Amino acid sequence: MSQTNIVAAAANAARPEGGVGRQYLVFTLNSETFAIDILQIREIIEFGELTSVPMTPPTVRGVINLRGAVVPVIDLSARFGRGSARVGRRSCIVIVEVDTESGTQTLGVMVDGVNEVLEIPAADIEPAPAFGARIRTDFIAGMARIDDRFVILLDVSRVLSVDEISALGSLAATPPSLN
Amino acid sequence: MDLSQALATFLDESRDLLAQMEEILLRAETSDLAPEDMHALFRCAHTIKGSAGLFGLDVVVRFTHGVENVLDRLRNGEIVFTDALINLLLESQDHIARLVHAVAASDALPEDEGGPLLERLQAFNNDFDGRAGDMVKACETERVEVDVASGIAIGAEHWHLSLRFGPDVLRNGMDPLAFINYLRSLGDIVHVETITDAVPELFAGDPEACHLGFEIALRSAAEKAEIEAVFEFVQDAATITIVPPCARIDAFIALIDALGEDPRRLGEILVACGSVTERELFQALADQHLATDPAPIGELLIERAAVQPRVVEAALGKQKSAEERRGGEGKSVKVPADRLDALIDQVGELVIAGAATQLHAQRTTNPDLQEVASNLLRLVEDVRDTALRLRMTPIGEVFNRFPRVVRDVSRELGKEIELVISGAEAELDKSMVERIGDPLMHLVRNAIDHGIEGPAQRLDASKPARGTLNLNAYHESGSIVIEVADDGKGLDAERIFAKAVERGLVAPDAQLSTAEIHRLILEPGFSTASEVTSLSGRGVGMDVVKSNVEALRGTLDISSEPGRGTTMRLCLPLTLAIIDGFQVGVSGSTFILPLDTVVECIELPSDAQGGGYLRLRDKVLPFVDLREMFGLEDEPCPARQNVVVVRFAGRQAGIAVDELLGECQTVIKPLGRLFERVAGIAGSTILGTGEVALILDVPQLVQRAITNEGRERSTAAQSSASIA
């Protein structure tokens, strides 16, 4: 483990922009702070026109037009089981790319606001606690210590698992009246 | 030179040629082949061999050479087609295909497998007298018939060649004498007459021009094409007429007529060559003089030809179709599919941008802008249509693989089946063509395996022993319909029902119509064949076909009559990219219905709200209320709702919406895997405003409306029954 870190650090140091560790986007959701590895983020856009898709679970907020491509938007608050997110002045959609078996899927993630891009040294990242984080443990990639407080680093591939979310969708799409 | 590109061309070409070989070989099974087919067959193998040689694919060359030898003997009439030989050639063709495939995948070439095949082919190559026994063993079938008589038996007659070299021949570096010398390689030259009539007086003419003509009598066993090939290089610069042996005097008259020289002089030359007897010539010329019109030879010939108008028509038709084919080849351009896809995508964006422009223009009060915008939109629509047509491919591309399948499968099962293909020219989007192959294959195999009975069983049912399988395609209201119809035993509704009960798919006391029972075979895990054959009946059958078809936004319909046969009807959209849509609004959201499914729009009667059915011109029309079904309650229900009457697969249903917004161009954007299990939504599109609108899945909605209605009816029936 430590050896890989050294290699990664060396690789980072070799780059002109330099630095130790990786860069993370820190954002707020329900007044909690989370972070996502920036390599998975394509862009951040303002929360705007959104079309909701009927008969989908609250986790799927709807779809947006991202320069001609139709991109689904996930309501992270609903995904964490804390009710639908409220649209505020700082609400944004973070566009991420998730690798799936059938190729890369582009998804939007609705958050209350983005704060900053931080470089977090690998040494400051600790493994996920077994309990107490108030979200599913498998969603957590690690806990990062920033300014003496902990920020949850999200495992995007788990949080935005297309298989899991679409399975939720099929439950909702089968109304009891059909059979 | 980039060899990989050339190799790709070779692979493409080889696949085409192999398909052609297969097609001809299959035809050989049922009817005698025309000589040009034999040549085509030979040419296919020959071209593959030659091209493979260029790339140093020795294994391909070696194997194809063996095939080519047999085909050469075939076309020379030294051996004739038998079932065994056709089988062997088909296997060989498969093997070449495997080799080519291996080249494409840069795998090691499967050399060993070719060995036994080559040995069997060799049996046909060797002198048949001595090897007849071996041959029989090798082919494991009946004796191979060999047509000895049609060999190189040329009588006293010979070919007659009439050459008139053009003035440029010498300048182009050709020597007429060289051609005549080369002719000797094909046979014996019996007689040559040199025609010097066109030679100008000394010093008067251009010394570099050629003025010579020759009349040549050639005794040869060669084919006309081979003789023609001798003159390949001067074809354009010379007039070459080749009259076959034993030709009728007409041919010579035509020759005389065509050359426009003094007929008597030419006639004498012909007599000198021994091609025509004096008496024949005299008779023909006398005929000519007898006629009232002074120069009627052409007409005379036509008159004579009219004796057998059908022969002439057939010849003309053949010539024409060959020319058309050749013309078609020259006019088509091969374009990589991804470039075409990129173009379609861009046109899609253009359509959206055009719609947006139109929308904004309409909001202004500037009539010029409005006019320009609507012109622009019209042009963009034209571009869209043309772009989509680029991707249109005839369905025949898929159908072509079935003759072989039907042949192989029916043999394996000991059934006699004739495949009738019609409508192969109906076109649909290339992406559809690629994806429809597997479902169709399944339906065809099913029809052969389960549908059509064995010959004995058919005769018992007083049907012809030979079953018929019809593959038919036609366009119908913006869709393409593909039918797979057999004249077999039809679906056994009782057995299907029993099986469905056994599998727990339906309740034993369920009351189902025959059509509903037929649809049970589309349920997952259903298979009626009592014994599992290698072809079908593994339980992963019709439900997979159905879901594949539905993934293409199509439907699968079954109609079957016991003892008369079964027809599977696939109804598919022509393209997956762009459709004409009809926009409707429900509670502030916009939805799109494919326009070709919309029949009419009516006002929703106030007593029929909330789903169910309504009365439309004295007929019951089941309908779904989108507001209720999708749970859209953001905005209050308007006082007046509308119903869009939609039709799909012969069924009608209504969809209740708040407002009707009119037609629009709709570029279909896939919604992705996240939404693939959402019922009622087929896809999405981007409106002129930039907003995303969802495209409704009409088949699912219709199905839903009908199940609703059926359930209400059955509850009504039950309640009335309980009252009685």
Image: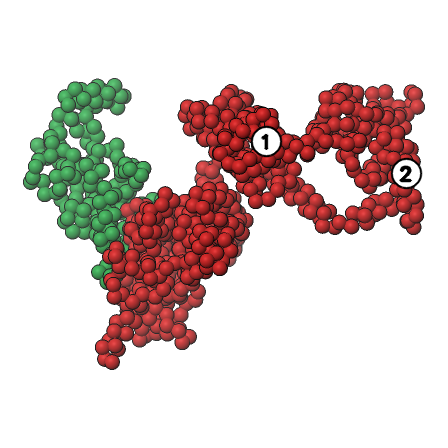
Q: Nearer the viewer, residue B547 or A115?
A: B547
Chain coloured red here: B
Instruction: Report the amino acid beneath label 2.
Output: Arg
Q: Horizontal and vertical percent for residue B717?
A: 28, 74
Residue B31 sits in quarter: top right
The residue where tag 1 is placed is B71
Q: Quadrant of the C terminus of chain A?
A: bottom left
Q: Nearer the viewer, residue B666 or B98?
A: B98
The residue where tag 2 is placed is B279
Mark 2 / mark 1, whichever is N-terminal = 1
Which residue is depicted at the point 37% across and 63% down?
B515
Q: Quadrant of the N terminus of chain A?
A: top left
Q: Nearer the viewer, residue B607 or B245?
A: B245
Q: Residues within 10 Å of mark 2 (few under 14, many from 20)?
A: few
Q: Horizontal and vertical percent for residue B420?
A: 52, 51
Instruction: Report the amino acid beneath label 1.
Output: Leu
Q: Horizontal and vertical percent for residue B234?
A: 74, 27
Chain coloured green here: A
Considering only vertical position in the picture, is B64 above or below B678? above
The alpha-carbon separation of the residues under discs 2 and 1 comes to: 42 Å
Q: What element does badge 2 sit on?
A: helix
Considering only vertical position in the picture, is A52 above or below A67? below
Q: Residues within 10 Å of mark 1 (few under 14, many from 20)?
A: many
Which residue is depicted at the point 82% across and 41% down?
B250
Which residue is depicted at the point 33% across and 47% down?
B532
Residue lying farthest to the bottom in this orientation = B724
